[in-house]
Amino acid sequence: MSDAPAQRLLLVHAHPDDETIGQGATMAKYAADGRGVTLVTCTAGEMGEILVPGLEHLAADRDDALGEHRRGELDEAMRILGVTDHRFLGGFGHYRDSGMKWHPQGYAIPADDTHDNAFWNADLTAAADLLVEVVREVRPQVLVTYDQFGNYGHPDHIQAHRVAMYAALLAAVPSYRLDLGEPWEISKIYWSAMPETRMRERLRALRAAGNTEAFGGLDPEGPLPMTTPDHLLSAAVDAADHVEQKMDAMRAHRTQIAVDGPFFALSNNLQDRVWGKEFFRIAKGERGDLGPDGLESDLFAGL
């Protein structure tokens, strides 16, 4: 660890592209600042919807080759963001994307059928131990993952939350599985968040521009189960200088994110504001200095 960066961030995500949508700008900013950024992806996203004509044959019910393709997309996205340490939990293919279906009220729920090796079916302790080893190797001060709802209900996001939180606990226990490395306590844990107010503003802007189908046609005045009430937010990392990196990294995930879809449908000025600032809820640790908005501007604040 003598040559490791002094400040180290670990992110735990479910599928390739989740990291870029959620914290791509933060990852690029911290990597550029010389901070350590480690990404652990829990599955290869084998069950994802394919948005590129001509690649439909990669689907799970045909060639079942989407995971390998998305592995390449993730490699390219991380190259764009400047992140050199990215891994799959237990190694590539150890856990499979569980798939999902939509609840009538607009959030994800488990699919009717899942693969035997689906991440949703993983033994919690076995999966956590795989991450404990990473935690004790990397020794991050800050961990970022999803909230208990997986931010929108996807079973793999919920499982990633469970695994990350349990692994953080186990990694710090002085007597636990010393074969996995020297114990390490993560000082601060954050859950990714989409502010309710910002999402409503985004939906209104899209509708004003004539796009009523974006994000599944969500009503900007209706329930938004994937958002976080603004008063629960803890931190906002302003990485507007890296928004183009984030957008380019999103384009790299081309089987999952349509370049003419809602993520790219906003004007450049609004896009910079929407995608260049990323929000978090603190789940463990003490907050550092707060800005005039009452939020931390740096996840390492106070450390």
Image (cartoon, rainbow, N blue to C red):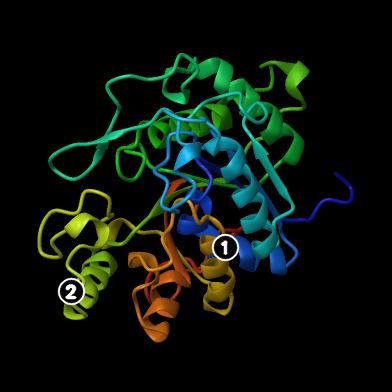
Q: Which residue is drawn at 50% across and 17% down?
A: 117
Q: Please name the residue that numbered disc 1 is placed on.
A: 249
Q: Which residue is drawn at 67% across and 39% down?
A: 87
Residue 187 in the image: above or below residue 89:
below
Q: In which quarter of the image is residue 171?
A: top right
Q: Return the residue found at the far bottom.
A: 269
Q: Crowdedness of circle 2 by 10 Å Cα count: few (<14), some, many (20+)? A: some
Q: Please name the residue that numbered disc 2 is placed on.
A: 207
Of mark 1 and mark 2, the one earlier in the sequence is 2
What x and y, as percent, mark residue 6? 77, 56
- Residue 282 in view in this figure: yes
The kind of residue tagged 2 is Arg
Q: Crowdedness of circle 1 by 10 Å Cα count: few (<14), some, many (20+)? A: many
Would residue 293 appear left or right of 212 to someone viewing this image? right
Q: Which residue is drawn at 42% across and 40% down?
A: 48
Q: In which quarter of the image is the C terminus?
A: bottom right
Would residue 61 appear left or right of 112 to someone viewing this image? right
Would residue 166 appear left or right of 151 to someone viewing this image? right
**Contact (Cβ within 8 Å) of mark 1 with mark 2:** no
Would residue 265 appear left or right of 119 to someone viewing this image? left
Q: Which of 242 and 45 is in front in this view?
A: 45
Q: Which of 45 and 37 is in front in this view?
A: 45
For the residue labelled by badge 1, is the local secondary structure a helix, a strand or a loop? helix
The kind of residue tagged 1 is Ala
Q: Quadrant of the N terminus?
A: top right
Q: Which of 27 and 74 is in front in this view?
A: 74
For the residue labelled by badge 2, is the local secondary structure a helix, a strand or a loop? helix
